Image (spheres, grey):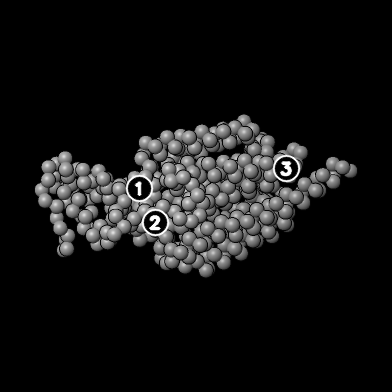
């Protein structure tokens, strides 16, 4: 370790104290080289006095130390986080309140199913009911996405310090302790329950199984190269919820069952697609840290896989429309629009650029999700006007 001054032999208690302060930020005047030297010295001290391999010490005992050596956390000076009290900022970062794309991705399947189910309701759900239901879904998406992020960071607290993009997350850098994160998760789940209870009672029974997926998704990346599929099962759950939310009985209607199943699988394909692009931002760090992802498994044929996922998504979406008797507005606007926007994204995204992957991940949400929503809205309004006219006659 050229240029590093090794720590002298110290009492065992002193050696451990060097690591216990690892969460404290480095002085800004320390250079990266100096920080790395200090980190290596501390790891050597712990290795010497605990008789454990340095790799285990680095991974389990001093992950925050490595995080600090890699970069220094600075309090946000701009954006929403800069207006919050400092004590609140770590918790706001924990739920990614400054990065709402995940909430939108969780919300879109909800609004898709709401608009698809509205014409099946008896009578057809009026626009104000559809709007109110959609706003409730939006509130639930924000709360549950935040809870999911907190659970994810709890599971990944020993992995995040080894990935450049995540090394300064609140739990990884020591700003929020695991115990406080667990308590915070409980509070978020209670808030989510409060939102859920505003829906008809059947929604409670349909929503409850999704909690198992929320809790276990972070484990998938440890055992499979396809954690994005598990994420798809989780994030697409809202594609089912719109039907019971508007009083459509999934158990008693074959058309509703088929539509919900096709819409759910369509959204799974969409989730895997956009999260595969997202995973390319961390592909190098994931390989070093031993984190599995579909981007690593199919790095050489990513665009072919993305193309297959896009075609699958649109085909299943069209099938959901057929099941509900959707009209031209849906097939042209939603299906045609999704096919075009996904094609443009797949062609233009530069998978070797972190910035480009992030741009398409954020904006692809609104572009593709937006055109599908517009087509569904147009189709619903056409049917609502037609049914309203028939009732008046």
Secondary structure of residue under mark 3: helix
Estimate how packed mark 2 is, as few (under 14), some (14 to 19) or many (20 or more) residues with alpha carbons within 10 Å: few
Residue for point 64% across, 38% down: 245
Residue pushed farthest left?
9
Q: Where is the C terminus found, in terms of image quarters?
A: top right
Instruction: Report the Cα–Cα distance between label 1 and label 3.
Output: 44 Å
Cβ atoms under marks 1 and 3 closer than 8 Å = no
- Percent position (x, y) of residue 119? 73, 44
Q: Earlier in the sequence, mark 2 or mark 1?
A: 2
Residue for point 42% across, 67% down: 352
Instruction: Report the Cα–Cα distance between label 3 and label 2.
Output: 42 Å
Residue pushed farthest top?
201
Residue pushed farthest right?
393
Which residue in the protein does label 1 denote? 172
Image quadrant assignment for residue 37: bottom left
36 with respect to 341 (left or right): left
Report whether residue 75 is seen.
yes
Q: Earlier in the sequence, mark 1 or mark 3?
A: 3
Secondary structure of residue under mark 1: helix
Cβ atoms under marks 3 and 2 closer than 8 Å = no
Report whether residue 290 is seen.
no
Q: Nearer the viewer, residue 108 or 18?
A: 18
Q: Where is the N terminus found, in terms of image quarters?
A: bottom left
Which residue in the protein does label 3 denote? 128
Q: Nearer the viewer, residue 187 or 54?
A: 187
Which residue in the protein does label 2 denote? 165
Estimate how packed mark 1 is, as few (under 14), some (14 to 19) or many (20 or more) residues with alpha carbons within 10 Å: many
Residue for point 51% across, 62% down: 359
Q: Nearer the viewer, residue 52 or 90?
A: 90
Marking on residue 277:
none
């Amino acid at each position: 370790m050229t240029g590093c001054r090794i720590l002298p032999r110290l009492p065992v208690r002193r050696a451990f104290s060097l690591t216990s302060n690892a969460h404290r930020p480095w002085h800004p005047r320390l250079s990266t080289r100096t920080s790395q030297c200090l980190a290596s010295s501390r790891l050597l001290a712990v290795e010497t006095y605990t008789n454990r391999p340095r790799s285990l010490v680095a991974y389990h005992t001093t992950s925050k130390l490595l995080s600090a050596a890699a970069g220094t956390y600075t309090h946000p000076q701009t954006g929403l986080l800069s207006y919050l009290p400092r004590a609140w900022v770590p918790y706001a970062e924990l739920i990614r309140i400054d990065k709402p794309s995940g909430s939108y991705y969780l919300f879109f399947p909800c609004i898709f199913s709401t608009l698809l189910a509205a014409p099946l309701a008896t009578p057809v759900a009026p626009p104000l009911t559809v709007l109110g239901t959609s706003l409730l879904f939006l509130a639930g998406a924000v709360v549950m996405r935040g809870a999911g992020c907190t659970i994810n960071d709890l599971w990944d607290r020993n992995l995040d310090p080894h990935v450049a993009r995540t090394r300064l997350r609140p739990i990884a850098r020591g700003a929020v302790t695991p115990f406080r994160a667990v308590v915070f998760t409980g509070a978020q789940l209670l808030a989510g329950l409060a939102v859920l209870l505003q829906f008809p009672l059947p929604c409670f029974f349909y929503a409850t199984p999704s909690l198992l997926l929320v809790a276990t998704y972070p484990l998938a990346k440890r055992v499979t190269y396809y954690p994005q599929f598990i994420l798809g099962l989780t994030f697409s759950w809202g594609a089912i919820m719109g039907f019971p939310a508007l009083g459509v009985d999934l158990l008693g209607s074959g058309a509703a069952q088929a539509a919900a199943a096709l819409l759910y699988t369509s959204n799974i394909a969409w989730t895997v697609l956009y999260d595969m692009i997202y995973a390319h931002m961390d592909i190098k760090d994931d390989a070093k840290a031993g984190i599995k992802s579909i981007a690593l498994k199919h790095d050489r044929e990513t665009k072919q896989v993305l193309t297959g996922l896009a075609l699958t998504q649109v085909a299943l979406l069209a099938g959901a429309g057929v099941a509900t008797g959707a009209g031209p507005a849906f097939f042209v606007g939603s299906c045609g629009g999704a096919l075009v926007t996904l094609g443009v994204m797949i062609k233009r995204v530069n998978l070797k650029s972190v910035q480009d992957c992030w741009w398409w991940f954020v904006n692809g949400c609104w572009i593709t999700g937006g055109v599908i929503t517009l087509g569904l809205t147009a189709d619903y309004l056409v049917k609502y006007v037609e049914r309203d006219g028939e009732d008046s006659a």
